[in-house]
């Protein structure tokens, strides 16, 4: 049987998604171009051999419109003969790109393919693709959910309430994320995965000195009288400190058939073992990581205890803590180099950013299996298991 392996994985350092952020002056196409150039250079693969480039991007409008992935490949000076496409599964867009890429290899449709993603949230803010007054849901959704859906921050508050996750627990989790990320950078653990861009050599949002006392001083980010009346169970505990920031960045992984890697003399980082995608309640929205984890383990024929390392996207601390309650996973094995709360969450880039961090952490720690999962807007989640070779 054919297998699909990752032979290289690289990302930009992640910048603050604000006008004064280190990457704010960089066009999103160039963010991804930089990453693709680094991927090709580090792998040593002839880019003309790539069968397709599949990229993720969430707000595909303005500077991120017109199939960003195609223009990033061209902007990198890479062969015109290589096609590219851009997909949207919200925050899981580039993880879905990796699923599609690997599935294409497994099916025999591809031999070599790039999965990647980008988001410049400073230049293309969230919701830029929804003009004022536009209805992205349509009458059928309005009829099915007459009380209306809610923003992700409200979903995070509902999750915290449902799983009895208090403010202190979320703040403590956020501090751990920053401590692990700071330690990772201090110990050189990110050097193999990051391609510095301009003056930015490290992730810009990591705060080594943050404490629970500092985070306790932050105000709730999503308190709204209308939602407070509708959801009296909410304690309003989600803040900017225990949620992911707004960011700019790009990431990419090079996936190919195992026999192709052997022919080219390349040493794979990991095998793409199993995949799953699920839908979940669009009101809670972010809980799909729970059934997605169960589904991918079932498909893989593995148990939770078989997994050495986990990457669970830290869109909100409440999401990871609810996932941990339901799965029973050991948090010591989750996001061991920090997660999105500290490193950042450039939406379309985050899927392959997690993959990049995971494959390098697996090699550094001698892990056999790694599991990655991401919650996504609309009540969706992807999950993927990697196996070291």
Image: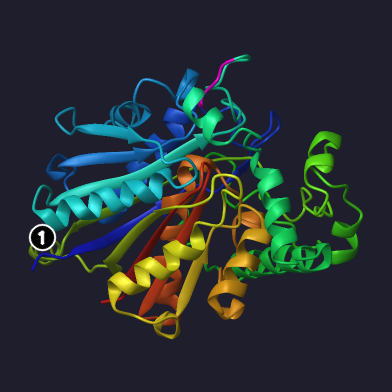
- Give the residue pinned by disc 1: 260
Q: Is residue 66 rendered to the left or right of residue 123?
A: left
Residue 66 image offset from top left, x and y in percent: 36, 20
The residue furthest bottom is 305
Residue 215 image offset from top left, x and y in percent: 85, 58
Give the residue drawn at x 62%, y 14%: 133
Q: Is residue 137 magenta?
A: yes
Please tell me in which quadrant of the rendered image residue 116 appears. Answer: top left
Does the image show residue 338?
no
Point out the image quarter for the C terminus: bottom left
Vertical side of 208 occupied by 378: above or below:
above
Give the residue drawn at x 61%, y 50%: 284
Point out the image quarter for the N terminus: bottom left
Q: Nearer the viewer, residue 51 or 94?
A: 94
The boundaries of the magenta stretch are 134-138
Q: Nearer the viewer, residue 126 or 27?
A: 126
Vertical side of 39 occupied by 61: above or below:
above
Q: Is residue 71 rendered to the left or right of residue 145?
A: left
Q: Is residue 21 magenta?
A: no
Residue 221 image offset from top left, x and y in percent: 80, 43
Question: How does the figure colour the protein chain or chains?
Answer: rainbow
Q: Nearer the viewer, residue 139 or 67?
A: 139
Give the residue drawn at x 27%, y 46%: 114
Q: Main secondary structure of the magenta part?
A: loop
Vertical side of 304 occupied by 51: above or below:
above
Secondary element at tag 1? helix
């Amino acid at each position: 049987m054919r297998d699909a392996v990752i032979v290289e994985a690289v990302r930009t350092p992640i910048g603050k998604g604000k006008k004064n952020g280190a990457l704010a002056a960089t066009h999103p196409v160039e963010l991804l171009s930089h990453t693709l150039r680094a991927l090709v250079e580090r792998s040593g693969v002839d880019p003309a051999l790539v069968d397709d480039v599949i990229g993720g991007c969430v707000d595909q409008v303005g500077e991120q419109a017109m199939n960003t992935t195609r223009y990033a490949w061209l902007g990198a000076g890479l062969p015109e003969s290589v096609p590219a496409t851009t997909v949207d599964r919200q925050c899981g867009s580039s993880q879905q790109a990796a699923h599609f890429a690997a599935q294409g290899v497994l099916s025999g449709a591809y031999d070599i393919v790039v999965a990647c993603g980008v988001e410049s949230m400073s230049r293309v803010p969230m919701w830029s693709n929804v003009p004022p007054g536009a209805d992205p849901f349509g009458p059928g959704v309005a009829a099915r959910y007459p009380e209306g859906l809610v923003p992700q921050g409200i979903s995070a508050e509902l999750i915290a309430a449902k799983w009895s996750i208090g403010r202190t627990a979320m703040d403590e989790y956020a501090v751990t994320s920053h401590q692990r990320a700071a330690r990772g950078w201090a110990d050189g653990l990110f050097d193999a995965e990051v391609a510095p861009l301009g003056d930015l050599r490290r992730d810009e949002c990591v705060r080594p000195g943050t404490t629970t006392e500092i985070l306790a001083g932050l105000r709730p980010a999503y308190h709204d009288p209308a939602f407070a009346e509708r959801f009296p169970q909410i304690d309003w505990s989600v803040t900017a400190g225990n949620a992911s920031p707004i960011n700019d960045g790009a990431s990419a992984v090079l996936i190919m058939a195992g026999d192709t890697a052997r022919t080219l003399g390349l040493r794979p980082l990991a095998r793409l073992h199993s995949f799953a995608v699920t839908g979940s309640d669009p009101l809670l929205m972010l809980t799909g990581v729970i059934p997605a984890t169960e589904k991918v383990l079932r498909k893989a024929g593995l148990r939770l205890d078989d997994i050495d390392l986990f990457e669970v996207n830290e869109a909100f601390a409440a999401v990871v803590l609810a996932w941990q309650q339901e799965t029973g996973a050991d948090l010591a094995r989750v996001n061991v180099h920090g997660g999105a709360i500290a490193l950042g969450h450039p939406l379309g880039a985050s899927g392959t950013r997690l993959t990049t961090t995971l494959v390098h952490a697996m090699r550094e720690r001698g892990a056999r299996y790694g599991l990655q999962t991401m919650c996504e807007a609309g009540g969706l989640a992807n999950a993927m298991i990697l196996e070291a070779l």
